[in-house]
Amino acid sequence: MYEVTSGVERDDLFNRIIRDQWTEHLGRRIDVLAAGCGRGGDPLTAPRMETRVTGIDEDLPALRRVVESRPDLDAFALGDLRLVPVPPRAFDVVHIDLVLERIRHAELVLDRLIAGLRPGGLLLLRMRDRESAYGFWDRVVPTPLRRLTWRRFTPSGTVGPLPAVYETITSRDGVRSFCLSRGLRISEEHTACAGPALRGTFGGLARLACRLVHSLSGGRRTAAHDEITFVIRKPQNQFARLI
């Protein structure tokens, strides 16, 4: 049974993942693939450890501006995530940050990114849950309305609005089924309420809308979280399914 918690800080979790891999590999350099680097955020480095970070994301103007300004990336590539080069078994850690819910063919992309992990490598996957109340609103609000209200509902400087696709895999059950079919082991699972609309000027209104959906759905579309982070390990066993 793996750990399920809420309210874990993203940076603390990421640094712990890096430290674990650094320790396992006796202090050698840790190679990190950061998918979703165009959203910005804190530097993907760990103190007192040698890391090399390669970023990839879609080639959208708002994302490109952020990626090109990030000093923590040693290299990056932008484009269709089904086609962007991902060297096989080249990375110790793959960090997928709020990507799956905004792209089509998400399962295919996830397969490609996991193929870039070395055996025994760790995948840190953070996504918006399509089954949450926040995820429900994010995917049903029409794109023109999202564009019109984005700056009013989100904190200043938030990148977006980005596409809201939410394929079936972008849910707790979707990821669990995916990992089971690929022979991947989920070691930790964390939930959080961190949607940008909840932190903007009209955050109270956004939370009220989420609670309304929670109540009308009988709790099936929960307002208790909107994000799920999974820590997933690729098997070392040479007889496990090769991905």
Image (cartoon, rainbow, N blue to C red):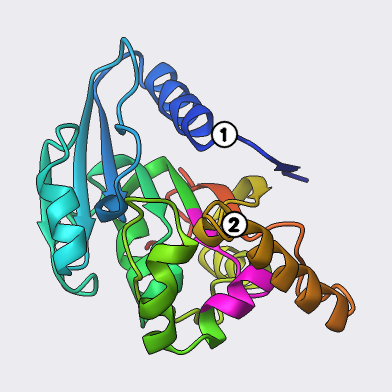
Residue for badge 1: 9
Reply yes or no: does residue 134 show up in magenta. yes
Residue 222 placement, left or right of 22? right
Query: Residue 68 bears which disc, if any?
Result: none
Residue for badge 2: 198
Residue 120 placement, left or right of 3? left
Q: Secondary structure at mark 2?
A: helix
Q: Is residue 177 above or below residue 193?
A: below
Task: Work out which residue is located at the far top of the displayed protein and give it.
Answer: 48
Kindly indicate the quadrant of the structure image that contains residue 222: bottom right
Q: Position of residue 155 (x, y in %)?
A: 43, 52
Asked if residue 107 can be seen in this view, the reply is no
Q: Position of residue 209 (x, y in %)?
A: 71, 73
Asked if residue 66 can be seen in this view, the reply is yes
Reply yes or no: does residue 93 show up in magenta. no
| Inter-mark Cα distance, 1 to 2 | 17 Å
- Classify the position of the C terminus by image quarter: bottom left
Residue at image location 9% in from the left, 48% down from the top: 68
Residue at image location 25% in from the left, 54% down from the top: 38
Q: Position of residue 199 (x, y in %)?
A: 55, 51
- Precedes in sequence: disc 1 or disc 2: 1
Q: Nearer the viewer, residue 78 or 225?
A: 225
Amino acid carrying label 2: it is: Leu
Q: Secondary structure at mark 1?
A: loop
Residue 92 placement, left or right of 61? right
Amino acid carrying label 1: it is: Glu
Mark 2, other Cα within 10 Å: few <14 / some 14–19 / many ≥20 = many
Q: Position of residue 130 (x, y in %)?
A: 60, 74
Kindly indicate the quadrant of the structure image that contains residue 217: bottom right
Q: Is residue 168 above or below residue 111?
A: below
The magenta segment is: 126-138
Residue 242 placement, left or right of 213? left
